[in-house]
Image: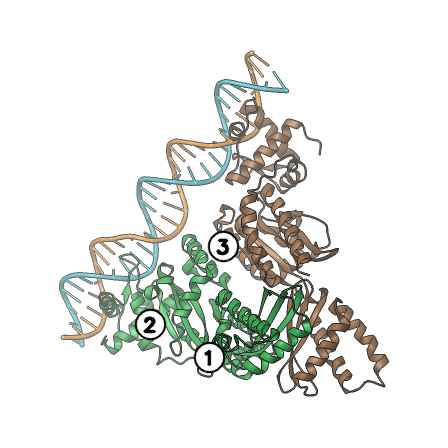
Chain colours: A green, B brown, C cyan, D orange
Amino acid sequence: MDLDDRTKRVLKAVVLSYIETAHPVGSRTVIQGSDFGVSSATIRSIMADLGEAGFLSQPHPSAGRVPTEKGYRFYVDTLLNEEAFQIHEDEILQQAALLVKHEDMRAILQDTSKLLSDLTHYMGIVTVPKFSSTRVKHIEFIRLRKKCVMTISVSEEGFIQNRFFEMLNDLSQKELNRISNYLNTLYKGMSLQDVRQELMGQIQKMKDLYDQLQSETLELTKQATMNGEQTDEGELYMDGTAHMLDLPDFNDSKIMKGLLNAFEKKRVILQLLERHIDSEGVQVFIGAENPFLGDHHCSLVVSPYKRGDRTLGALGVIGPTRMAYSKVIPLVDMAAKQVSRLLEENT
Amino acid sequence: MDLDDRTKRVLKAVVLSYIETAHPVGSRTVIQGSDFGVSSATIRSIMADLGEAGFLSQPHPSAGRVPTEKGYRFYVDTLLNEEAFQIHEDEILQQAALLVKHEDMRAILQDTSKLLSDLTHYMGIVTVPKFSSTRVKHIEFIRLRKKCVMTISVSEEGFIQNRFFEMLNDLSQKELNRISNYLNTLYKGMSLQDVRQELMGQIQKMKDLYDQLQSETLELTKQATMNGEQTDEGELYMDGTAHMLDLPDFNDSKIMKGLLNAFEKKRVILQLLERHIDSEGVQVFIGAENPFLGDHHCSLVVSPYKRGDRTLGALGVIGPTRMAYSKVIPLVDMAAKQVSRLLEENT
DNA sequence: ATTGGCACTCTGGCACGGTGAGTGCTAATT
DNA sequence: AATTAGCACTCACCGTGCCAGAGTGCCAAT
């Protein structure tokens, strides 16, 4: 797209105005906004060009112009960089301070989703890493009742997982302690997946000569890791659904219903995020660019967060296509970095 | 209120019809519903009486009748008992089976809120007991890094809580294990509050002769219990907000916004539930009977759940005043009993 | 006490017309 | 060749008026 410099300015003016007011913007409005030094007629012809090129559209033949998804795309890709990313940093830092208090990593992620939603007035979303992809720091077994054992695993990243399961034989708490001690020295810092693999290898070797304790150890570990894999679906924190109702974009109750029903199915959004979890940095998906947001006039700004070089999850913001991208994008970026930093620290 | 028997029947017919259709019900509709053997004119005069007595009201002077809150109240208190509580038990049991798989008690409560919402198509809510009011089964300390310790407590009821805190001195994992072993034998089955109290007593006695380990033990326990009290606000699971949008009662977007904003503040609802947590059995609050639900045309059906004779939390359903009470009330009752049963079993 | 009939009231939907914002086009201007 | 002013045109929006339908209240008759 090679657009005239002045044409770009017009497009940008339209996008900005529409983002602010949610009203179709006419040629007069464009002039009032920034001083072009030309008359509305000129703007009109330029806007007609932009309409032909697919960047703008008209809700009805004699209304002002509204950016198309292509228009937003161009704005985000080309016009946004030049803008000063002005965030109220004090505000952010103040809020972010809340995250620092030592807490379960899950609580921090939940707070993050609330932070994102509060600062943007859109919806904040944060995925929780699958536990099986984190590194084990500590495993503990607790005897609940005859043959019924609970396992608590703490990951190096600060996540905690617990499972219940039944054993073939009854073990005393003392025996369980011995086993967990053994495992803690043996498997420290491996991912659950690794542990499981390692274990499977051992089974062969030990087959003949294992003693009672080791056999139980094997079973425990197998249960702890397997159970994990089975029910370890990703989790998702979502906050700020109510904000969306305040937006004029979703005043139509039909759209809103569809939207909320879609949001109720967290699984869908989870897939949505996980699909792009491997990319680097902030990504923006506008409207139908993402099938899940399809008809809902929604955009998604998302960034992965990581510990070291391992991507653990993603966080971001869902809002209307008419989103304040210039505020949201740097915010999501910051949040991802902040979370990554906390994961690093928590070692 | 001493109402004519036939008058009661009319009131009941109006309530039932309105609950079903959400349309103001006219005299003709009443006749069509159940066979009264009288003409619409007669019904009209009866309905006029009911209106004067405050059980019915008219949205506008020439429309059908709608139950007032007083009307619902009378229906719930007096007319409901005679009805057959017909629930699709198979459906419930099928769903409830999901709750039985051994899981963290929190997960079970969360599933319960989903169950309540799915079966009623209203909102399901379940409070989580304050951890400090449960009985400790097992305490575990895990050393995260220098001077930084995590404590995991498992309650007899099946709840898990974890806290992070900093120690004055650095302790090895081995020492921590000794301490937790000591505590586990010592304090088994006491509530965190009790533990704390017991501890405070010990401090005096030991003041002179404690050795290093015991001093640390004291500090750890103090931290574990105190931390608990501080941040141990009640939690709340809520499910089915989206259902509420499908109800014609909340089609007006103003009402709905207020509603959702109110729901976003879970704390308010929590207070709401905790206020009535000490009562026995299912309670019904209709509309403004409860200040929190005040202007929102909502009712609340709630029941406490307990372990033994100790009430731990409450669960229930929030729906429109026009709620299918005859289905919801027995369902909430069942759910509370089911949860209580699970808490008992989990020992 | 109950009923049928009748007049009345109010809502909801629909058509109608005026207003205003905004466009596209053309002819004049620089 | 680009820009501008002017003008006719097009819709959405809003208020009005009207009609049908549902339901009531009342009254006289049973």
- Residue at 61 percent across and 30 percent down: it is B9
Tally of marks: 3
In the rendered structure, the answer to whether residue A56 lies left or right of residue B85 reads left
Give the CA distance from mark 1 to mark 2: 37 Å
- Residue at 56 percent across and 21 percent down: it is B37
Residue B185 sits in quarter: bottom right
The residue labelled by disc 3 is B242
Q: Which amino acid does label 3 sit on?
A: Ala
Mark closer to the observer (2, 3): 3
**Residue under mark 2: which chain is it in?**
A
Give the CA distance from mark 2 to mark 3: 37 Å
The residue labelled by disc 2 is A13
Q: Do the residues labelled 3 and 1 touch (CB within 8 Å)?
A: no
Q: What crowding class fits label 2: few (fewer than 14 Cα within 10 Å), some (14-19), or many (20 or more)?
A: some
> The residue tagged with tag 3: helix, strand or loop?
helix
Residue A284 sits in quarter: bottom left
Q: Where is residue B161 in the image (x, y as percent from the top left)?
A: 64, 70
> The residue tagged with tag 1: helix, strand or loop?
strand
Query: As displayed, is residue A342 above or below residue A241?
Result: below
Q: Residue A306 got which mark?
A: 1
- In the depicted view, which residue is nearer to us: B238 or B46? B238
